[in-house]
Image (spheres, rainbow, N blue to C red):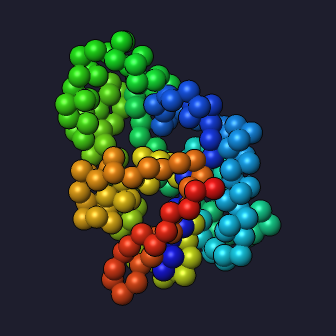
Amino acid sequence: MNLYFVRHGETKENQGGSYYGSLDVELTEQGILQSHRAEEILRDINFKTVYISEKKRAEQTADILLKNKHCNLIRDSRINETNFGEFEGKAYDKIKELYPAEWKLWCENWRDFAPPGGESYLQVYGRVKSFMDDILKLDEENILIVTHGGVIRSIYCYILGGNLDFFWSFGSKNCDITLIKYEYGNLFIDSITHV
């Protein structure tokens, strides 16, 4: 099985370095161009099933990637980006200024700390693990998953035995294409392509 993970194209919040997950924002012109470049790379691959997060940026990216393709499109909340609660839409320095106590807790225990009204990375990993456990039960050759940077990093951790220590060991740029293969019971990262 070939699992093609694509991070959505660039948004204005990416440009500004904001933490955002639950904000439902659209792609920039650059994000649209990135999505078209990714579509060229994936053009000749036949996808029967495509999973996307519930966010506009993932849907817009998928629409471009699937140009002229007829696929079973499934929205799955388990691959939504981290909900940063009251930190949503704010850059790191602004969070530090507005929420000094919470920021300190976040820095000391990033895995377990949930911003006010948000979720922790451990909670995000839990839903990503549930998604991956279900995906690996499918019998399909190629599956496309259009999602978010935090989700993709969580998937890398899943491949590495669920160790969240690896979360910050990988980058995830807008419209990166990650090919993960599942063969003979083994799950491995085959390639990461920057567009």
Q: Residue furthest top?
A: 98
Q: Residue at x 66, y 76 (%)?
A: 45
Q: Position of residue 186 (x, y in %)?
A: 34, 80
**Image vertical order of residue 180 relative to residue 151, above or below:** below
Classify residue 109 as left or right of residue 36.
left
Percent coordinates x, y for residue 42 in the rendering: 67, 68
Quarter-of-image position of residue 43: bottom right
Toward the viewer: 37 or 116?
Answer: 37
Residue at (45%, 76%) from the top-left corner?
181
Q: Is residue 55 left or right of residue 91?
A: right
Residue 92 shows up from this direction:
yes
**How many marks do you count on the picture?**
0
In the rendered image, the quadrant that contains the C terminus is: bottom right
Query: For residue 157, what is the image quadrant?
Result: bottom left
Measured along the vertical axis of the image, is residue 141 above or below residue 86? below
Q: Residue furthest right?
A: 68
Find residue 40 and report its horizontal and vertical position in percent: 73, 64
The spot of residue 174 in percent (x, y) is 57, 47
Q: Does 92 sit above or below residue 36?
A: above
Rendered residue at 44%/54% (across/down)? 152
Front residue of this view, candidates 6 and 171:
171
In this rendered view, identify the residue nearer to me: 47 or 187. 187
Tell me if residue 151 can be seen.
no
Lateral position of residue 99 relative to residue 139, left or right: left
